[in-house]
Image (cartoon, rainbow, N blue to C red):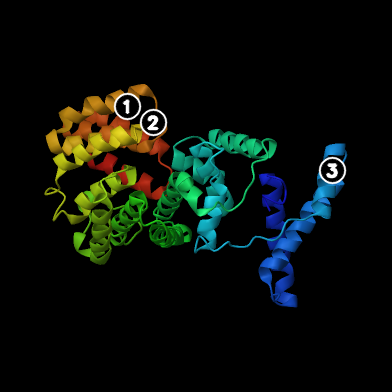
């Protein structure tokens, strides 16, 4: 539909939604058609043509409508080079004419069904900021007449970084453990497996799959019986999925042997340090600090700095880490991120500065995005009294 409407993402989305709404009304009574995709495509196109006809008050709109009626493009079909339709569409949407963030945001919006608020949370920006980014990206697609076609095999590596980011953010959205979103993580892992098989010479594809498996291995112990968050330090490691850990570690080793370590391989190595440690205290924190140093070189971000500070506190003490966290806070780059203030509170608590720690905890509480995170912060406030 994006291709059919000449790159008009909003019109394509509206018409697709209308087609599904028609199906929900009619199929229970009329039965599912023999070719459901063709039915939905036709319904969506008819809606698009009708919209353009009714709004064709300018010559340009008339010409666009006439072109759609005269030579409608063929329905979406797979060219067979990518063995999964959803993955194929991700490569199609991740067009290099857009910047990386725009590729990822539009693909999450169009294919994963994530809301603007979901995407904004993943990028650590406000919903309004993300809405503006998505709007500008859609406008660029429309005005630059960017073609949306399945890329040939030799162009897939150019689009790989964006597709990897889409899959990882999709996994993280499902990793929130909200019941209606858990399936997203499973789908992201499935697609990552397909991608690693499709592009065996791309170590970052394997690195992403390893990272997902190593993180997903901890899922069974991340929540208590009441749905509360269980921190890494308190998790029952006997409940971790050892098959996932073994598989993820083996995939990571095969990726690292190619000696082209990228950000997903480094993050997977960090996850492996946690997953293979016999206990929280026995974790190789100095190695994790070193891995974050490498990650900061290849993919610098304030989130990497914050996570490195957490590891530094474990390796060398909170007095070494607090100045780093204070510097991040002073920069304003993570002002709205609750874990910045929660991390600072923990460091202050360990240094005996309880009044300042409680103040930071309350700031984190005000910013926490979910009930489970708010309950965890409230417990910490009560424990300090």
What kind of element bears circle 3?
helix
Location of mark 1 (residue): 328
Give the label on residue 270, or none.
Answer: none
Examine the rendering and report whether any part of residue 54 can be seen: yes
Of helix, strand and loop, which one carries label 1? helix
Seen in the picture, residue 228 relative to 319 is either above or below; the reply is below
Q: Which residue is mark 3?
A: 63
Left or right of 373? Residue 288 is left
Distance Cα–Cα, label 2 vs label 1: 7 Å
Task: Count neighbours of disc 2 (C-alpha within 10 A) and say few if under 14, some if 14 to 19, many if 20 or more.
Answer: some
Q: Examine the image and state in which quarter residue 238 appears.
A: bottom left
Residue at 11% over, 49% down? 282
Q: Nearer the viewer, residue 128 or 10?
A: 10
Residue closest to the eye, 268 or 375: 268
Dot 3 surroundings within 10 Å: few (below 14), some, or many (20 or more)? Answer: few
Identify the mark nearer the N-term, 2 or 3. 3
Image position, residue 368 (x, y; %): 40, 41
Q: CA distance from mark 2 to mark 3?
A: 48 Å
Using the image, tell me which numbered label, if any, was put on residue 334. Answer: 2
**Image coords of residue 357 (percent x, y):** 26, 31
Image-quadrant location for residue 276: bottom left
Where is residue 27 shown, x and y percent of the image?
Answer: 71, 73
Task: Give x and y (percent) for residue 374.
Answer: 37, 44
Task: Locate residue 297 relative to residue 11 in the image: left or right.
Answer: left
Gap between marks 3 and 1 measured at Cα: 53 Å
- Label 2: state its secondary structure: loop
First in sequence: mark 2 vs mark 1: 1
* In front: label 3 or label 1: 3
Q: Is residue 203 left or right of residue 42?
A: left
């Amino acid at each position: 539909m994006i291709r059919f409407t000449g790159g008009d993402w909003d019109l394509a989305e509206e018409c697709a939604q209308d087609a599904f709404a028609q199906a929900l009304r009619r199929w229970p009574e009329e039965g599912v058609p023999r070719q459901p995709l063709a039915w939905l495509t036709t319904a969506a196109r008819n809606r698009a043509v009708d919209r353009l006809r009714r709004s064709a008050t300018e010559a340009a709109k008339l010409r666009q409508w006439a072109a759609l009626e005269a030579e409608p493009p063929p329905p979406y079909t797979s060219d067979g080079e990518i063995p999964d339709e959803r993955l194929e569409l991700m490569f199609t949407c991740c067009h290099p004419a857009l910047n990386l963030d725009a590729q990822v945001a539009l693909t999450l919006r169009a294919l994963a069904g994530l809301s603007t608020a979901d995407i904004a949370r993943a990028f650590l920006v406000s919903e309004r900021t993300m809405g503006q980014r998505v709007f500008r990206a859609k406008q660029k697609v429309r005005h630059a007449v960017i073609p949306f076609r399945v890329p040939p095999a030799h162009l897939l590596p150019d689009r790989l970084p964006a597709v990897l980011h889409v899959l990882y953010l999709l996994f993280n959205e499902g990793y929130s453990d909200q019941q209606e979103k858990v399936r997203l993580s499973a789908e992201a892992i499935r697609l990552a497996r397909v991608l690693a098989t499709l592009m065996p010479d791309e170590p970052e594809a394997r690195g992403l799959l390893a990272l997902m498996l190593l993180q997903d291995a901890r899922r069974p112990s991340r929540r208590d019986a009441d749905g509360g968050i269980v921190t890494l330090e308190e998790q029952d490691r006997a409940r971790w999925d050892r098959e996932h850990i073994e598989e993820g570690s083996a995939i990571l080793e095969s990726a690292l042997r190619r000696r082209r370590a990228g950000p997903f391989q480094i993050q997977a190595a960090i996850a492996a340090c946690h997953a293979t440690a016999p206990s929280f205290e026995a974790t190789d924190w100095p190695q994790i600090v070193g891995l974050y140093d490498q990650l900061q070189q290849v993919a610098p971000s304030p989130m990497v700095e914050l996570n490195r500070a957490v590891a530094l506190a474990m390796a060398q003490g909170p007095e070494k880490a607090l100045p780093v966290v204070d510097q991040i806070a002073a920069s304003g780059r993570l002002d709205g991120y609750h874990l910045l203030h929660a991390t600072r509170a923990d460091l202050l608590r360990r240094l005996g500065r309880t009044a300042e720690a409680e103040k930071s905890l309350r700031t984190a509480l005000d910013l926490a995005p979910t009930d489970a995170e708010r309950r965890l912060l409230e417990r910490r406030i009560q424990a300090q009294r």
